[in-house]
Amino acid sequence: MAYYFLFILINEVINIKNIGQKLKERREELGFSLEDIHKKTKLSLIHIKEIENGNLDYFRHDISYLKFFLQYYCQAVYMDFDDIKDDYEDVLNDYTQTQILKKQEQKEASNQNIQKRIQANAPKLKKTTSYLDRINPQAVLMLVGLLLLVALLVFGAIKFIVPLFSNTDIPTNDTIIIPKEPSDVKEPIVETPTIPEPEPIEEPYVVTVVQENPLKYIVDNVQAKPTLLKILFNEDTWIQVYVNGNKTNNPASQIYKKGQQIEFPIDLSMKEVMFHLGYFKGNEFYINDTKIELDPATANKVSGAKITFVIKGDAQ
């Protein structure tokens, strides 16, 4: 069993290391820092580092939430969770087997300790038995018979001889009733401790942006939460904004200087938001502080352009 336990433990470590290595390589391939992943997933930096290091022992108290952590990480690096799903399921199965084997080993160790104690006390029991064997059964019977004879003589003296010398009647009722004293001792009440359930981890709010064509993008998974479309101007640029085909003056239609930025709140009542820029190259678009990767043909235009964002999501 020890070799089998060691095999499962090694296999468990290899699988979680594979998952961490794949995610780390994907993050570095995209040029994301650990801080970038923290902002995208809302996971703590220590959680992200331990995932990449493949440290399963760090998540021993959060093993039921590990799947959600990995899914958030995959979304942040645009990676399909199915690519690591088999490794994750192997890790979970190996971890479960490891816990079962640990309990079996603890039980076997406990049984061995009990057997050792029984064997240690065996000589004492043997000595007691041999002492009893040395008692003569005939002597015991004679002693018991003598005691019975004395008891009969005493009983006869009390029953027949004592009444002859007494002027008072001896009551015939030999039953003595002893009243039972009430007990003031109360049994202690043992309170069962309540184990608090772990607080559920709130899933991070992640909005996805998918390109439909170079000038049209689908903003999906928008919820009834604060959501911002932000433009950072790296060149002096004139802009006009349209919501559902209607021109709006918030933000104002004007020329914005290099280094300025505008934040435009969006919600599900807006089906489409179009930005008309007089000069496009160098300007950056963000959704909730996450940069939107624009098509290179659009991002490098040295002329004006109209870019449309289609808003989709769940109102609940």
Image (cartoon, rainbow, N blue to C red):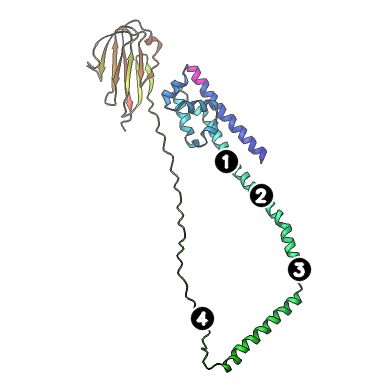
Instruction: Write the residue at 32% across / 28% down.
Output: 225
The residue tagged 4 is 176
Q: In the drawing, does residue 82 fall left or right of residue 284?
A: right
The residue tagged 1 is 99
- Tag nearer the camera, 1 or 4: 4
- Tag nearer the camera, 3 or 1: 3
Q: Do the residues labelled 3 and 1 touch (CB within 8 Å)?
A: no
| Amino acid bearing label 4 | Ile
For label 2, count other residues whose C-alpha is less than 10 Å away and answer few (under 14), some (14-19) or many (20+).
Answer: few
| Amino acid bearing label 2 | Asn
| Amino acid bearing label 1 | Gln
Query: Which x, y percent locates residue 76?
Result: 44, 23
Q: Quadrant for the N terminus, please.
A: top right
The residue tagged 3 is 133
Query: Which x, y percent locates residue 154?
Result: 63, 86
Spatial distance from mark 2 to mark 1, Cα to Cα? 21 Å
